[in-house]
Image (cartoon, grey):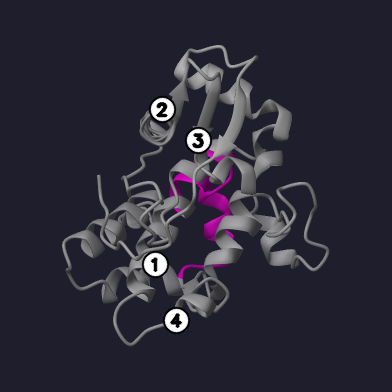
Amino acid sequence: MKSQKSLVELSSALLLNVKLNKDTTALKQQLRVLSFEELQHQLNRDESKKTFWINIYNAYFQLLSNPGKAKRKTIFTQKSIEIAQNTFSLDDIEHGILRRFRWKWSFGYLSNPLVSSLIKALAVQTIDYRIHFALNCGAKSCPPIAFYTLEKLDEELNFVTESFLYSETSIDDNNKTVSTSKLLYWYCADFGGYFKIKNVLKDVLNRDFTNYKLSFNAYSWETQLNNFM
């Protein structure tokens, strides 16, 4: 693949074609026929894994959400993403690879006992809570879609985290309450546990919420596709 795009570049190119409503056939074919060995070779550290799989997730959610494609109930679990001669679901990418095979319904506290050897081989070593502000599942309350690059991944994830939490967090100083996105509640273990959520908000928003009551916004599942930054 020396004369071709790197995997991270391919993931970004796929996402760009989705945004511009251009044909994605050739790019999907390159990803499909890739060898598993090359996939592991190029995605050999957490930074490259996060960059590649976030772009892939966001691109494929939009593709799978086209009229006549998967219904919302099955869109996350259907294995229709073909990469390196294997098929993945959106849940495989989010909860298996990017969240290191956390069980989807455990608030991030439990590993999935049925995880495959394939997912174990591709998963990140350390869960980065910022991925929750990078993945877009087509709902109105989801973070907008951005393009991620290996060279500036940390800066880009910090930016979307700060941007999303500033937009989703309401502070009432008179009543000492703070309300933020329900994503932090659903995946609280990824943020260090329920009682560490206010610490995350403190670090990102530069405010001390020690004596504030924490609550979470209602999550709008109203469809909002093509929500690019």
Query: Residue at coordinates 71% horizontally, 40% vertically from top-left?
Result: 189
Read off the residue under disc 2. 162
Q: Amino acid at mark 3?
A: Thr
Q: Which residue is mark 1?
A: 60
Residue at 50 percent of width and 35 percent of height: 180
Q: CA distance from mark 1 to mark 2?
A: 25 Å
Residue extent of the magenta highlight: 34-52
Q: Residues within 10 Å of mark 2 (few under 14, many from 20)?
A: some
Three-letter amino acid code of the residue under disc 4: Lys
Q: Earlier in the sequence, mark 3 or mark 1?
A: 1
Sequence-earlier tag: 2 or 3 = 2
Q: Is residue 195 left or right of residue 3?
A: right
- Depth check: give the residue in front, 139 or 156: 139
Mark 4 vs 2, N-terminal side: 4
Identify the mark at residue 71; answer none if there is no mark.
Answer: 4
What residue is pinned by disc 3?
A: 180
Nearest the viewer among 68 and 184 is: 184
